[in-house]
Image (tube, rainbow, N blue to C red):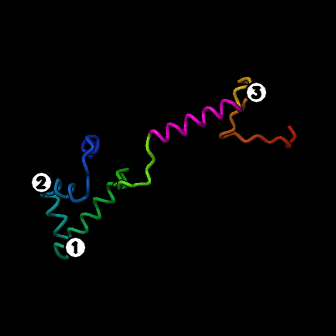
Amino acid sequence: MKDTRRDCEVQTAKIVAGFVHDQHPDWLQSYLEGKKDTTTAYESLLRLLRRFAYRRGFVQRTPSRLKEKLSDLIGVRDEFATTFNKSIGSYDANLVYNTDETGIYFDAPP
C-alpha cells in the first residue's frame, strides 16, 4: 500500500479488494465462506479493508476548493515573520522566554 501511495496512485478499498482477489485467493475464499451471501461478503470485505487502511494511517482525501495557494501561504508567512521581527527583534536572546510548553507563574512565591 505504501509503495502505491508513494507513487501518487489512488488507493481505494475496491483496488485493494482486487489485489486480495488476485494475490490471496485461498484466504479470500475462506473469508467468503463465513458470510450469508456474496453481496454481504463483498460489503464486509470492503469495510474490513477500509478499517485496516484507517488503522494504518491511510485516509482518502478529496480535493477541495478551500485549499490555499502555496504562494498565498508563503506571503502570509513572510508578513508574519516581518511583523514578529519588528516587535521582538529589539530584545536580546537571553531576555526572550519560550513559553510554548512551559508555564510561568509570576505571582507564585518561590
Q: Give the position of the C terminus as an image quadrant.
A: top right
**77, 32: nearer the viewer:** 77
Q: Is residue 74 left or right of residue 110?
A: left
Q: Is residue 57 above or below residue 86?
A: below
Q: Along the polypeptide, which appears first: circle 2 or circle 3?
A: 2
* Magenta residue check for 42: no
Write down the quadrant of residue 82 in the picture. Answer: top right
- Residue at position x 48%, y 41% in the image: 72
Distance from Cα at disc 2 to Cα at disc 3: 65 Å
Foreground tag (2 vs 3): 3
Labelled disc at residue 22: 2
- Residue at position x 49%, y 41% in the image: 73
Distance from Cα at disc 1 to Cα at disc 3: 66 Å
Residue at disc 1, secondary structure: helix
Labelled disc at residue 40: 1
Residue at disc 3, secondary structure: helix
Residue wearing tag 3: 95
Main SS, magenta residues: helix
Q: Along the polypeptide, which appears first: circle 1 or circle 3?
A: 1
**74, 15: nearer the viewer:** 74
Foreground tag (1 vs 3): 3
**15, 65: nearer the viewer:** 65
Q: How many marks?
A: 3
Label 2 amino acid? Answer: Asp
Label 1 amino acid? Answer: Thr
Q: Is residue 34 above or below residue 11?
A: below
- Residue at position x 16%, y 57% in the image: 18
Magenta highlight range: 71-87
Write down the quadrant of residue 8 in the picture. Answer: top left
